[in-house]
Image (cartoon, rainbow, N blue to C red):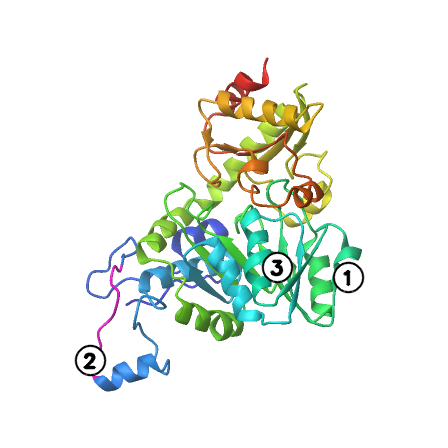
Amino acid sequence: MSEPFQPESYGIDTLGVRAGTLRTGEFMEHSEAMYLTSSFCFNSAAEAAERFANSEEGYTYSRFTNPTVSMFQSRLAALEGAEACMATASGMSAILSVALATLQAGDHLVSSRSIFGSTMTLFNTILAKFGVETTYVDGTDLAAWRAAVKPNTKLFFLETPSNPLTEISDIAAVGEIAHNAGALFVVDNCFCSPALQQPIRFGADVVVHSATKHIDGQGRVLGGAVLGKHDFIMGKVFPFVRTAGPTLSAFNAWVMLKGMETLAIRMERHSQSALALAQFLESHPAVSRVFHPALKSHPQYAVAQRQQSGGGAIVSFELKGDTPEQMRANAWRVIDNTKLCSITGNLGDTRTTITHPYTTTHGRVAPETKAAAGISEGLIRLAVGLESVEDLKADLLRGLGQ
């Protein structure tokens, strides 16, 4: 196969199209090849032994080595500015891989409170079952991060922007606290993607992705990724993935390689449309609050301006109501009256999606925990796609009222 494209000093638009590409010497295919094979053959028993011992580079078995997946890993690493990447079957398997490659019974992790519901469930149930303790803090409160540190703290986990309120945390400041505590600093970059934010530039040790979202960008396949220093990815994460098998398929890797080719231009359009909708919603009398990082009313607007090149696709807004029951009824009315928006929990799609976080993405989270995170019955999360903004406004007005 040909040598992979070297990132050097190319811009993100070029990297999204070219980075990581390999071509076979026989066919010199222009588009990336899809290697749908479970295993690879060897020229001799000795070569097989060398490959399985990892003393010779090459492919052995697609649970942990596959050329199409390697291209995906190289391209995403180039976009994030990371030394290495390990692909996984989903975003949740990426987070699990980092946790189980890093933590053991008796360890402690500190996490921002405003995170994806499944991530919180992973920490509270699965990791807790194996003796790992989690402390949750307000992601924007640096004093709370410092106060949460214990002698056995091994990992800091931060999601920024957060799901679903787009809370922005200062990556560099939290990273300094983590490193002073001797903890690994992990940032979930799902909402921004590397097109809008590169956490490693601000001090993150590890970046995790649900590549199912913006990396694919069209709601087609599942995938995840862990990125960071070569020694950590290949020394800690790779052995776990190799043995436990939360593997990204070659087909899904190929689909997401195609997705990355348009990532930068999609994220620019998502950000523009989301801001326009956020401004529209802020002026509507039925809406009490709107959350989008590019709104000047956002509590962490200044931080977002420093570390993000765009606000992203997510707009969350809260409807007015005198009681939680009335707020839920109002939110469900808006959702149920849409005809263009897709009612689904996924995001990062070309098609705009709408959901009620309290009863869907965070439905398994305890009510008091949702309240602490600011997730109310009246909250709606909108993941803005690539449709006409005017059409989306009209769709929301069916439930909001004129």
Quadrant in which residue 183 is drawn: bottom right
User: Which mark is first along the chain, 3 or 2?
Assistant: 2
CB contact under 8 Å: marks 1 and 3: no
Magenta span: predominant SS is loop
Q: Judge whether residue 234 is colored magenta.
A: no
Tell me if I can see residue 83 in this picture.
yes
Q: Amino acid at mark 1?
A: Arg
User: Which mark is first along the chain, 1 or 2?
Assistant: 2
Q: Residues within 10 Å of mark 2 (few under 14, many from 20)?
A: few
State the residue position of label 1.
146
The CA span between labels 2 and 1 is 56 Å
Please report the bounds of the magenta region as a residue range: 35-44
Q: Nearer the viewer, mark 1 or mark 3?
A: 1
State the residue position of label 3.
201
Q: Which mark is residue 43?
A: 2
Q: Amino acid at mark 3?
A: Arg
**Image location (x, y in percent) of residue 379:** 62, 32
